[in-house]
Amino acid sequence: MNEQREIIYAQRNSVLQGENLREYIVAMIEDVVESGVNGHLTGVEDSMDEDIKKLIAYFDDLFLLKGAVKMKKVYAGKTKDVFALENGNYLLKFKDDCTGKDGKFDPGENAVGLTIDGVGDVNLRMSIHFFEKVNAAGIKTHYISADLANTTMEVLPAECFGKAQGGNGLEVICRLVATGSFIRRYGEYIADGTPLEGGYVECTFKNDAKGDPLVTGEGLAALGVMSPALFESMKEQTLKITKIVADDLKTIGLDLWDIKFEFGYNNGEVILIDEIASGNMRVYKDG
């Protein structure tokens, strides 16, 4: 007992004197890990899978803080990472990466083009703000809660449109002003910056390799992604949500030109998912 007390006091004095205890701590962790492995892996092949499960549970209990949320990373996106939670929900971790090209921000691009310090926090706050407004308007979203300190949002599980057919999901774009890829496709028919009265809704499949190909409502029905009635309902919801966002931005002197949404199924019900943030919209001040 005296020997243990002397060791503890010696370690305490080292801490008080500012000494680097890294080597000692690493050695201590290695001892604990070795002890756990020796105590849970029997070496019997038939029980190996069960032994590993018990070992993982042992380390979880040993190293996770009490009350800490257990989660598993299931997807690494351009601007967010997605984690599965034990309660069946998901956690979105917002990052400071932005889509763009040649170091210039562009929400229409399909690759990360730059990193802006703090933009993940801004996008999370924007998403909270707009999801709460959309929910208040009676339109259901996947938003549950957010943790600003960790730049995360807890959301309901949802199956993206097109997943069942082997795709990566569907993006729904509402354009209030002609610009971006709309002009690249139809520039000979309309000038950049021309208002699109009432809003123009179009859909693209999420497929970076193919440049997010356009798909019509009839195409979605033919492919078994959604019925014509569901497409019209989603289009109506898109226009309503776009108006909510545009009207809110107008109060601070900003004009929404276009915005991108994602929808999905939750328990058979269509809900708005993903985020409503700077990376999903084009906004201008004074043109």
Image (cartoon, rainbow, N blue to C red):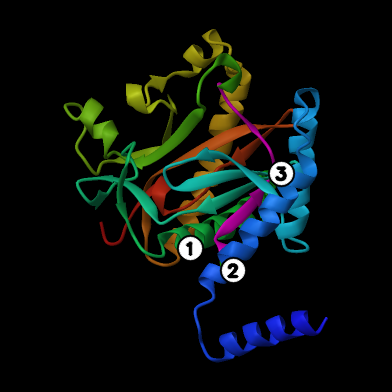
- On whether residue 161 falls in the magenta region, the answer is yes
Q: Nearer the viewer, residue 117 or 196?
A: 117
Circle 1 SS class: helix
Residue 220 can be seen, yes or no = yes
Question: Residue visible at 54% across and 17% down?
Answer: 166
Which quadrant would the C terminus be assigned to in this image? Answer: bottom left
Residue 268 at x, y percent in the picture: 74, 28
Label 3 Cα neighbours within 10 Å, binned few <14 / some 14-19 / many ≥20: some
Q: Is residue 184 left or right of residue 141?
A: left
Please determine whether, in this image, residue 38 is positioned above or below residue 213: below
* Type of the residue with mark 2: Ile
Circle 2 SS class: helix
Residue 263 at x, y percent in the picture: 58, 34
Q: Which residue is mark 3?
A: 89
Mark 3 and mark 1 in contact (Cβ < 8 Å)?
A: no
Which quadrant would the N terminus be assigned to in this image? Answer: bottom right
Q: Which residue is mark 2?
A: 25
